[in-house]
């Protein structure tokens, strides 16, 4: 790998004004946990709706100025400790030559779903800069706009989750068609899963080069699989991504003289292999936390059906955990939200922990309830 | 309770030709586990489709001859050890005065969903014989048709699951509206949940009087709740039902002289309080298996995301378990199905176990694959 054109210091020494999130990813002691919300740049924000009404879904994803603006909207409005780049997991299959549409009041629609080995063979592992360069441009622009206030997360869907959409052709309660394809044609399924994995690794490496401080893999549909099938059809591929990212990103330090003097010896390193922090979030994947906890991932996302105590136990007790407030619970009165957030932090423990929801924020959450969630975490140390 | 018009001996002494299922519910040693499949009377069977094309959904539920015929179809075709009465969980809210429609290519639709305390107040706890007498007639007819070959299960939705439909007004991936109602208006939510619970207890007691050998409670949407909210909004009510059914059904024995001589003292009891076997199936409710395992339920259903080993551990190791083959796995080639079924039985152990799927059978399963599942269990002892 040759990253010499990229000018990013190793994570944690970037001079971020708020590095709580990176501290939590490294397992360092913090005064209070960092906080962000999945889908924090989303439909509960009036300023997001204003842009949504003017630009269609993929225009928002593919126009760096729009993606960057949407990414920083929640930072201004509710003040989480981390930004996550506005994008969609389905830009990856799009780049692989699979047509993806976003239908009004329906969600994603793939008019030519993958159903045969011939379909699989037509799918390409693309040149990332040519197909997804707009994401990298959005990252660079967002980093400028964030001005080192908070770190930036980049994300991708897990290979299994992308596979689900590519085969099912749309959202589903149980992705039975996708699962049926795996079980009746496992060879073809594995070829497709490997192509998605290879693409995702290239994609996430480019995102790191473009400037994201950590990446998150969303395995939204991993919970549809049995534990045994999860290992075969999902975790095996997620772990390839974790392995590829966690230790292989080389960076060339290009600190300013000022920073060098502050950092001493560390600042003088000119070529360094750094660890990219990977967060793995498998919705409904409590049964795989044990395997995940032994991996090189920096943190694991947990949904609200797994209690903090169970999550610590199942994941082995050492890895940083992220989650797990029930998004619907943000409809509770604000005092109830704040009380439940403090109970959640008490149960996870303040260290090796990133406060978050257990899934994406819902469109019908009042903005002041979302802000109450963030505020409650910030007030935690001050009880 | 006055059951003197009903002539059912205590369960297990009814002279059923195949009592494997009741043995497993009582925790007795068996040569091989009993087997049935959730939704075994369903859309994968050509003879079911033939009736579906002639009669609409609620006609099938409300016409005893049709419900009984549909119930016995899979017994003839694939030979499971248990029948389950064809019906729907939504006949209960219907009886409570909530309009329920079944829309083509859409599923259940409730045109006037419950959204306020005023709506809740209008919901009634009905007279069961007046509103749901057709179910009792279907049970009596089915028992005649089954001719004591296999036992018959009656079922109901859990109060939480019925609540989800009553408030959401339709199926949903996450029932956010129903959950939002609980969290923003818990008092009204509990009033409605209690009304559903009271109705369900009356309904299931009538089913037992009409002749079912066991009942199953389907908590299809319990897995949408956090463990703490599950206790408050679902398990609390399910457990009321279990408590009401497990020990309170009084029956008057009316054995023939022949049976009396076989049964000795037991046969001479004329008034006896018997235990109704209750199976609780909470989809996605692995986190509640501990609490459930301490209850008076006779067995717990398990979905395929919880490994047999985890299910035994979480439920405390003593209670009979039922499940948990991934319904999509019936799309695997038949030899793979048979191998996986035997592995599943090995992992659960043959005793205190009822082989089943982890959820309902899918419409696209070939009949010979469904039969292979049942056959594999029957062949287990003969390996």
Image (cartoon, coloured by chain):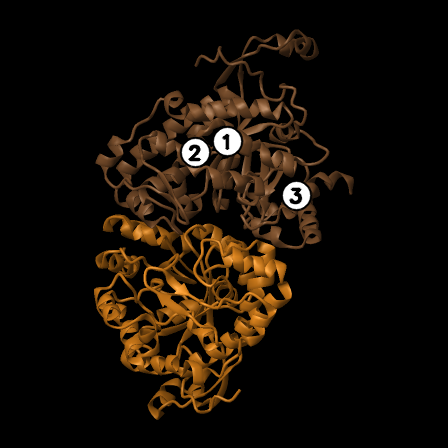
Chain colours: A orange, B brown
Residue B7: image location, x then y, percent:
54, 13
Report the residue marked by disc 2: B59
Q: Is residue B78 above or below residue A316?
A: above
Nearer to us in this view, B51 or A252: B51
Q: Looking at this rendering, what residue extends furthest in the front direction?
A: B54
Classify 10 Å Cα crowding around label 3: few (below 14), some (14-19), many (20 and above). Answer: some
Q: Position of residue A33 (x, y in %)?
A: 36, 62
The quadrant in which the N terminus of chain B is found is top left
Q: Nearer the viewer, residue A186 or B76?
A: B76
Q: Nearer the viewer, residue B280 or A211?
A: B280
Quarter of image, res B374 = top right
**Dot 3 falls on which chain?**
B
Q: Are marks 1 and 3 on the same chain?
A: yes
Determine whether A176 is above or below A121 in the image. above
Dots 2 and 1 on the same chain: yes
Q: Earlier in the sequence, mark 2 or mark 3?
A: 2
The x, y position of residue A281, in whole percent, is 46, 62
**Residue B208 visible in the snapshot:** yes
Q: Which residue is mark 3?
A: B371
Q: Are marks 2 and 1 in contact (CB under 8 Å)?
A: yes
Residue A327 lies, in percent from the top left, at 34, 54
**Residue underneath mark 1:** B66
Chain letter for the residue marked with disc 1 in the picture: B
Quadrant position of the C terminus of chain B in the picture: top right
The Cα–Cα distance between marks 2 and 3, rounded to whole angstroms, is 28 Å
Classify residue A335 as left or right of residue A190.
left
Crowding near the residue tagged with mark 1, few <14, some 14–19, many ≥20 C-alpha atoms within 10 Å: some
SS at badge 1: helix
Compare marks 2 and 1 and give the one earlier in the sequence: 2
Within the image, what quadrant is residue A321 found in?
bottom left
């Amino acid at each position: 790998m040759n990253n010499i054109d990229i000018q990013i210091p190793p994570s944690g020494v970037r001079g971020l004004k708020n590095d709580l999130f990176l501290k939590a990813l490294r397992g360092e002691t913090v005064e209070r946990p960092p906080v962000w919300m999945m889908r924090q740049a989303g439909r509960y924000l009036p300023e997001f709706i204003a842009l949504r009404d003017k630009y269609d879904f993929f225009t928002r994803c593919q126009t760096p100025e729009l993606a960057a603006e949407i990414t920083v909207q929640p930072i201004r409005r509710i003040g989480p400790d981390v930004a996550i780049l506005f994008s969609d997991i389905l830009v990856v299959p799009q780049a692989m030559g699979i047509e993806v549409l976003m239908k009004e009041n329906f969600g994603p629609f793939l008019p030519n779903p993958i159903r045969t080995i011939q379909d699989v063979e037509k799918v390409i592992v693309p040149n990332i800069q040519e197909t997804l360069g707009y994401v990298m441009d959005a990252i660079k622009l967002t980093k400028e706009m964030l001005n080192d206030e908070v770190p930036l997360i980049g994300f991708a869907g897990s290979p299994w989750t992308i596979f689900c959409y590519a085969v099912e052709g749309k959202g589903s309660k149980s992705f039975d068609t996708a699962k049926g394809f795996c079980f009746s044609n496992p060879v073809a399924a594995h070829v497709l899963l490997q192509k998605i994995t290879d693409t995702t690794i290239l994609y996430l490496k480019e995102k790191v080069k473009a400037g994201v401080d950590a990446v998150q893999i969303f395995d939204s549909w991993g919970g549809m699989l049995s534990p045994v099938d999860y290992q075969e059809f999902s975790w095996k591929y997620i772990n390839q991504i974790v392995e590829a990212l966690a230790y292989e990103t080389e960076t060339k330090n290009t600190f300013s003289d000022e920073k060098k003097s502050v950092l001493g010896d560390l600042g003088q390193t000119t070529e360094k292999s750094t660890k990219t922090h990977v967060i793995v979030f498998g919705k409904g994947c409590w049964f795989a936390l044990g395997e995940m906890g032994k991996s090189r991932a920096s943190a694991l996302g947990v949904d609200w059906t797994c209690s903090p105590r169970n999550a610590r136990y199942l994941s082995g007790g050492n890895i940083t955990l992220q989650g797990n407030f029930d998004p619907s619970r943000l409809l509770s009165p604000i005092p109830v939200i704040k009380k439940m957030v403090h109970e959640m932090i008490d149960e996870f423990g303040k260290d090796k922990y990133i406060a978050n929801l257990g899934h994406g924020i819902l469109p019908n959450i009042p903005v002041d309830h979302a802000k109450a969630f963030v505020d409650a975490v910030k007030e935690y140390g001050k009880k």
